[in-house]
Image (cartoon, rainbow, N blue to C red):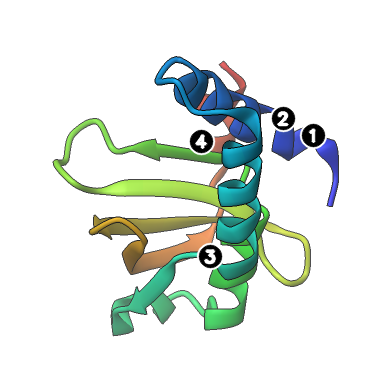
């Protein structure tokens, strides 16, 4: 794991949490727990349409570099992380509750998505 993906995600969340009176120790303990445990991931069969495996999706979650809502849709999000081979993949999901996501699509990261992130 490298610091390049961790800083934007962790410090962005810390800025959000600190503004709400969350202490640093509490924040680190919860972040570590979430990192180890991860969310409960529900997989819809369409998630595997492009040959991405359950292990790839879980690994991408553990190494995510971006996580953002889709502008056109309500309650649809996408995160980008690295599969087990180290290649970037896009994972589309619906958040369900506090610590559960339902993955409905996953595929190799497209060049247009990478270009949008660079902007």
Task: Quote the CA–CA distance across marks 4 and 3.
Answer: 28 Å
Camera-side residue of 119 and 84: 84
Percent x, y of residue 79: 48, 48
CA separation, marks 2 and 3? Answer: 18 Å
Q: How far apart are marks 4 and 1 (CA)?
A: 21 Å
Looking at the rendered structure, the secondary structure element under dot 2 is: helix
Q: How crowded is mark 4: few (under 14 residues within 10 Å), some or many (20 or more)?
A: few
Q: Of label 2 and label 4, which has the lower sequence position?
A: 2
Label 1 vs label 3, nearer the camera: 3
Mark 2 / mark 3, whichever is N-terminal: 2
Task: Return the residue at label 4.
Answer: 112
Q: How many marks?
A: 4
Q: Distance between the residues labelled 2 and 1?
A: 6 Å
Question: Callout 4: helix, strand or loop?
Answer: helix
Local crowd size for mark 1, using a 10 Å CA cut-off: few (<14), some (14–19), many (≥20): few
Residue for badge 2: 7
Which residue is the site of mark 1?
A: 4
Is residue 86 rendered to the left or right of residue 73?
A: right
SS type, badge 1: helix
How many other residues sit within 10 Å of disc 2, few (<14), some (14-19) or many (≥20)?
few
Residue in the picture at 67% in, 54% down? 63
């Amino acid at each position: 794991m490298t610091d390049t993906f961790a800083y934007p995600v962790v410090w962005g969340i810390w800025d959000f949490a600190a503004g709400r009176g969350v202490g640093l120790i509490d924040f680190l303990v919860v972040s570590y727990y979430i990192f180890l445990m991860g969310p409960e991931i529900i997989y819809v069969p369409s998630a595997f349409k492009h040959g991405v495996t359950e292990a790839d999706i879980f690994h991408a979650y553990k190494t995510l570099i971006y996580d953002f809502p889709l502008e056109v849709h309500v309650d649809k999000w996408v995160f980008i992380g690295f599969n087990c081979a180290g290649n970037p993949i896009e994972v589309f999901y619906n958040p369900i509750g506090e610590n559960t996501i339902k993955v409905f699509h996953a595929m190799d990261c497209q060049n247009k998505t990478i270009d949008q992130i660079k902007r």
